[in-house]
Amino acid sequence: MLAFFLLSIITFGTVGIRAKLVQALEHRGKVVIGPKNPAQSHIILDGLDVDFFSAFFSLPRFRVSYNGSRANALEQMLLNSKAHRKIVNLHWGYEHSDTPAPFQRELAHRLIDAGADIIIGHHPHVPQGEEIYKGKHIYYSLGNFNFWQFDTKTTENNRWGYMVNYDLVSGDTKTIPYRINKNYQPYRISCEEEADLFSKLNHLSEAASNVNFRKWFKMEYASWYRYELGVWKKLCFGGGSPLLWLKWFAWLCMSMQFKYYAYVMQSKLQFIGQRQ
């Protein structure tokens, strides 16, 4: 079984800082995916040509279409690749949401159709389920690993995650769950705890495979919106700069927000109608 380590660079800051970071990592023999978005890196492992792909979808605060130019470019990279294995690493999704959005699932299927052998997602800070599509594995979110959870109130799902062991030759995968201690460090767990986390992962996987927009929007997006609104209020009313207030206004005017406002108004009108 060949375990591999995917290093995805999601960079913020100046070009010079990014260049120095990439140079330092490559000097130490690391395979860097990025900082271009999307990006492709090639390596030969045990005689196999392997292409690593990555993309960063900055959906949560400023909407980026999952069916736009970035998705198109990533799809074309996969179609053009002649590698034996094509591994895709995606920074996507909604923070603290247990279920991926329907348009994430559509993109994942599209990338598998374009040739991806496995898709590994991250960003929500909580685990999300696994799906097998046309014999290929899609891991929507691995959850936190060695990460300082910046929220003041962490949930149970912020405190566990799972790793993926992928065999490049056979294409078989193995998931390895773990828990995270109070110092934000992952640690090995007992067989009993492992069984409990596998049960949770199976439940999440079932939800991911049966997600639809109406249900997801009502439950997951509504919860995410309330959480993000609280973050923005805390930042801006806590002495935020004019630029930060402008960003909050832009966030409030995202297209998905107007869908949410319409949903809230419709729900209120239905509630009033039922009372009458």
Image (tube, rainbow, N blue to C red):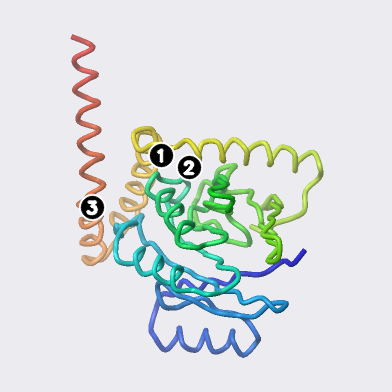
Q: Quadrant of residue 202?
A: top right
N-terminal-most mark, 3 or 2: 2
Q: Between marks 2 and 1, how big is the CA–CA gap?
A: 7 Å
- The three-letter code of the residue at mark 3 reads Met
Relative vertical location of residue 184 with respect to residue 44 in this rendering, above or below: above
Q: Quadrant of the C terminus?
A: top left
Q: Secondary structure at mark 3?
A: loop
- Viewer-proximal residue among 113 and 165: 113
What residue would you read off at disc 1?
A: 220
Which mark is drawn over residue 244?
A: none
- The three-letter code of the residue at mark 1 reads Glu
- The three-letter code of the residue at mark 2 reads Thr
259 relative to 89 in the view: left or right: left
What residue would you read off at disc 2?
A: 99
Q: Residue at x 51, y 36 (%)?
A: 207
User: Callout 1: 10 Å neighbours few (<14), some, many (20+)?
Assistant: some
N-terminal-most mark, 1 or 3: 1
Q: Secondary structure at mark 2?
A: loop
Q: Secondary structure at mark 1?
A: helix
What residue would you read off at disc 3?
A: 254
Whole-percent x and y of residue 230? 35, 47
111 relative to 253 in the view: left or right: right
